[in-house]
Amino acid sequence: MIIVPTRELCGQVAKVQAMLKHTNSEFEVLAVYGGTSINDQIYKLRNGVDIIVGTPGRTIDLANRG
């Protein structure tokens, strides 16, 4: 889990993490931040991710939802 202060930085860090993959199936990265559908993020989390890059607010919100 990587916590970043802004949604712009969240997107940048997630993009760099995804570029580090040798193959598409090596690991899954998910950026979680406000201003996008939380339901889509919950769906992706339930299907499994290896690295979460998120802003504090959305990360806490998702953690509180279980």
Image (cartoon, rainbow, N blue to C red):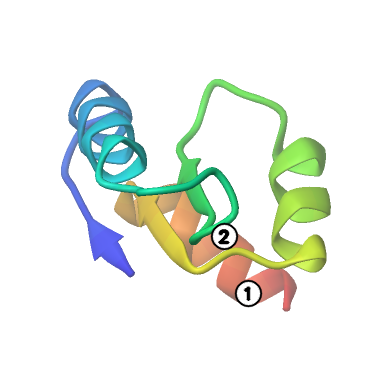
x, y (%) of residue 58? 48, 49
Quarter assignment of residue 35: top right
Q: Between residue 5 and residue 11, name the one nearer to us.
A: 11
How far across and down, in percent of the image, does residue 59 sit?
Answer: 46, 59
Residue picked out by circle 2: 61
21 in relation to 6, above or below? below
* Local SS, label 2: helix
Discs 2, 1 touching: Cβ within 8 Å:
yes
Picture quarter with the N terminus = bottom left
The numbered mark at residue 23 is none
Residue 36 coordinates in the image, percent (x, y): 61, 23
Measured along the vertical axis of the image, is residue 32 above or below residue 56?
Answer: above
Q: Quadrant of residue 46?
A: bottom right
- Identify which residue is drawn at 24% across, 21% down: 8
Q: Which amino acid does label 2 sit on?
A: Asp
Q: Which residue is drawn at 50% across and 69% down?
A: 50
> Mark 1 — residue?
64
Query: Which amino acid type is marked by label 1?
Result: Asn
Question: What residue appears at the point 60 percent right and 64 percent down from the top-left corner?
Answer: 49
Q: Where is residue 29 in the image (x, y as percent from the top left)?
A: 47, 50
Numbered disc 1: secondary structure? helix
